Amino acid sequence: MTEAGERHASWLELFFDLVVVVAVAQLAHRLQHPTWTNVVLFVVLYYAVWSVWTSLTLYSNVRAGKTRVPSMLVGMFGIAVMAAAAPDVAHEIDKAAGTHDGWFIAAYIVCRISASRSIQHAGTVMTAWPAAQLGAGLFPWVASIWADGSTRYGLWALGILLDVVFSVVNSRRPERFLAEMRGQAHRLAEREERRVRAGRPARPLPRPAAAVLDPAHLGERLGLFVIIVLGEGVMQVVVSASGHSWGPELAVAAAAGFGLIVALWWLTFQYGLTTVPGAAERGLPPYVALPAHFAMTAGVTATAAGLGVVAAQPAQSLHHGAGWVLGGGLALYFAASAVLGVALRAGWRWIWGWAVPTALAPLGVAALSGLVPGYVSVTLLLAVALWRLVYRPGRTGSEHSDQVRSAGDVLPA
């Protein structure tokens, strides 16, 4: 806490984030030799890690100083297991060991149930993102234990779809969702009363109340996750450059890649998580901000994987889908921001002059990536990001102030 009482991420939360650094690195490696199957599995696996992190982040946001350390540590260990298993999902190690799918499934289910129980024991209802507390999205993951091959991964994708739909639909009607949860609590209380009459000891059953989020703290936590995935970009370039001779092509690729990462960081620092000018004045409901956060950070992770491929062979053109991972990741990042800009009614000058072009241009670079050296592709993507960066909104009318925003200014108070 600061002197003014402003809340910031705790040491426990920062310690918890360490395992996410490893998980993001493991997932990025799946994209260095991309196939359609690997890309789809990356999205599914990334969502699983992100959803556990989000559930526990929302829990700690609501509970603040009352956050239970064991709950966070269970989630931390579970994500570590998921990270260790991720490279070998759908990849048979040997005939005896098979894949690590089962370990990933078990860790994910345990983490989600643990986070849900922690929120429920606190007596709060997570109306902002109900999947953090419960949801049909977990059942396909349980069913996938007895499935294999494409059926198993199809069930995982179905679980993600149910998670997102459940959260968006119910968070848009928080009063109804809260009433349903209180109805369930009332039925539990009636069963508890029958237990007491049967001579069993009474157990405390808190009456559910709507969870109250701390918007500034949640925005800071989401922003810290962005910093984690940007750090993955730095690591990919540094690690891939090691063990190779350094020439002018690598110098250009490394400088352009670092410049691209700095540009994305600066956009987040300047305008907030959405990178939409003026977002702070209106804010975003969590059911909009959280899916956007997932898409944007997944896009940055994909771009980071592409930067690693370029740094390893900067003079070679990008083939076998690596160029589409590099450019497509940045396109996803900017496309999510453009959609948010439309939702926030940002100025049309920004939407058509900066947001839409920066969402489409990386796809053009991806299409050219097989014809030009890798360092040229990265330099072109840097130019795209710089075009977005040079935007300067006006101080009146439909354009908003150009004051520097923090990542905590995204969500409404």
Image (tube, rainbow, N blue to C red):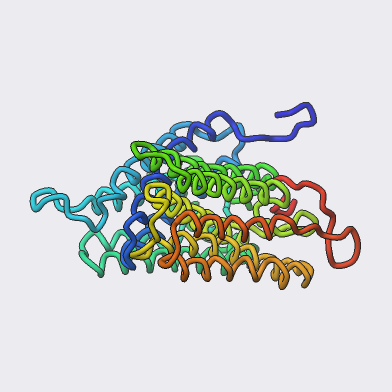
Q: State the residue in front, 395 or 386.
A: 386
| Whether residue 337 is situated above or below residue 230 in the rendered picture | below
Instruction: Give the side of residue 95 with respect to residue 355, left or right.
Output: left
Residue at 39% of width from left, 61% of height from top? 318
Q: Position of residue 162 (x, y in %)?
A: 44, 67
State the quadrant of the N terminus: top right
Query: Quick one: which residue is furthest to the right in this view?
Result: 396
Q: Position of residue 152 (x, y in %)?
A: 26, 65
Q: State the residue in front, 294 or 148.
A: 294
Query: Quick one: which residue is furthest to the left in this view?
Result: 96
Residue at 74% of width from left, 56% of height from top? 390
Instruction: Give the side of residue 285 with respect to residue 246, left or right.
Output: right
| Whether residue 405 is situated above or below residue 343 in the rendered picture | above
Number of marks drawn: 0
Q: State the residue in front, 313 or 285.
A: 313
Q: State the residue in front, 302 or 224.
A: 302
Residue at 58% of width from left, 50% of height from top? 260
